[in-house]
Image: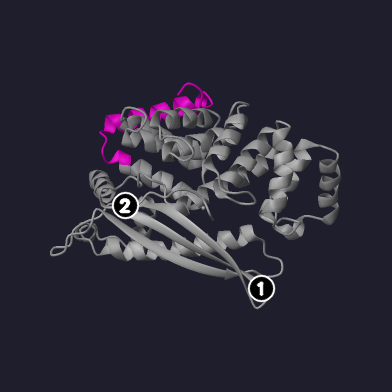
Amino acid sequence: MRALFVIILLTALVLPTVAFAEIQTFTATHTYILGDHDSKDEARQRCLLEAKRNILEQAGVYIESASEVKNFDLTKDKITSFAAAVMQVKDTKEDVSFQQEHMTMTLKLTAQVDLAEVRKQLAARQLDAGVRDTVTTQQERLKYLEAQLEAMQQALGRVPASPSSNISPAFVQTLRTRAAQGDAEAQTNLGLLYYNGQGVPQDYVQAAKWLEKAAVEGFAGAQVAFGLLYDEGKGVPQDYTRARQWYEKAAAQGNVWAQGMLGLLYYEGRGISKDDTQARQWTEKAAAQGNAAAQGMLGFLYARGQGVSQNNVMAYMWYSLAAPQMTGEDQKSAANSREAVARRMTPAQIAEGQRLAQQCQSRQFKGC
């Protein structure tokens, strides 16, 4: 996940001899000198990423010094992920100036770690060390969004899932011609090319321009992609409320990607009040259409009892359905989560989870 969302900050602890304050505040400043072809949006994006990275390093050192964390023997990478999961951005200040005829942008970021939230997260980890953290970290969420966009792009059917060098100028020109004539599908695909930098220079502003045209015309694929730009703050100011509104428009048309993203928004409480029940309901809609990420998320919700009664059998079922559809690290994560749940189950419960998974698959994920 780029300039995205509110990241909640963690729970703090007490050294044997030093008591931590309940709220710890961190600040970081980064300056970027714009090149001739850099936009302010791109400069802001880079400043924000560097400032967040700096703050995560500070928060990681702070959390690592806590005695409760030491008891978990966490690696530095896991401590950084833990910090991202509990860090809350409180203030962003931006200043633009000129140095030697070049525009410079300086961004100051202020974030906090809530010690009460740290304790809560540690307690949850202690109860179930095998299940992934309750809050998706910034890095994990970015990966999820990118996977969603790539899969959505392929589902639209017209943009080749191939390197930029394999997309011919003739293909791009055909898209431009059709897009200029008001073809919503061509506008969407052209916007996705600009988003990914395939066949054209990567340009989020151009991506937003073409996706918005198709979204306004009611093309669901464009609506969810345009919502994603607001979600990430790429080509448009970051605005979770507008992201949600565009997701809702696409979800109303049955778009599986929009349904999954709405579930994530409700779970994380971005642009709307956190609501685990709504998160589960939207995620179920996407899972019923065969979306593997949504199925894995349902396994997570059932394992934790969030938005639904805790049920290891159902968690096992959804993880079993999700894992075979995934690849690489995503598949490994889903399989590991399933095995973590299985360790808390009896052989009879595991057999029931397997039976339900086979039954659900035979029904094409409907009414599971």
Camera-side residue: 188 or 153? 188
Cβ atoms under marks 2 and 1 closer than 8 Å = no
**Callout 2: SS:** loop
Camera-side residue: 176 or 198? 176
The answer to whether residue 164 shows anywhere in this view is yes
66 w.r.t. 283: above or below: below
- What amino acid type is highlighted by mark number 1? His
Q: What stretch is highlighted in magenta?
A: 341-368
Report x, y in % for residue 253: 63, 26
**Callout 1: SS:** strand
| Residue at the limit of the structure toward the top, as seen here | 367
Crowding at mark 1 (Cα within 10 Å: few <14, some 14-19, many 20+): few
Report x, y in % for residue 120: 26, 45
- Which residue is under mark 1? 102
Asked which colour scheme the image uses, the reply is: one colour
| Most frequent secondary structure within the magenta stretch | helix
Task: Tell me what residue is drawn at x 50 percent, y 28 percent.
Answer: 361
Asked whether 366 falls inside the magenta stretch, the response is yes
Q: Is residue 207 left or right of residue 18?
A: right
- What amino acid type is highlighted by mark number 2? Leu
| Residue at the limit of the structure toward the left, as seen here | 17
Crowding at mark 2 (Cα within 10 Å: few <14, some 14-19, many 20+): many
Report x, y in % for residue 291: 54, 36
Nearer-N-terminus badge (2/1): 2
- Which residue is under mark 2? 10
Camera-side residue: 335 or 252? 252
The answer to whether residue 159 shows anywhere in this view is no
Disc 2 and disc 1: Cα gap in Å? 39 Å
| Residue at the limit of the structure toward the bottom, as seen here | 100
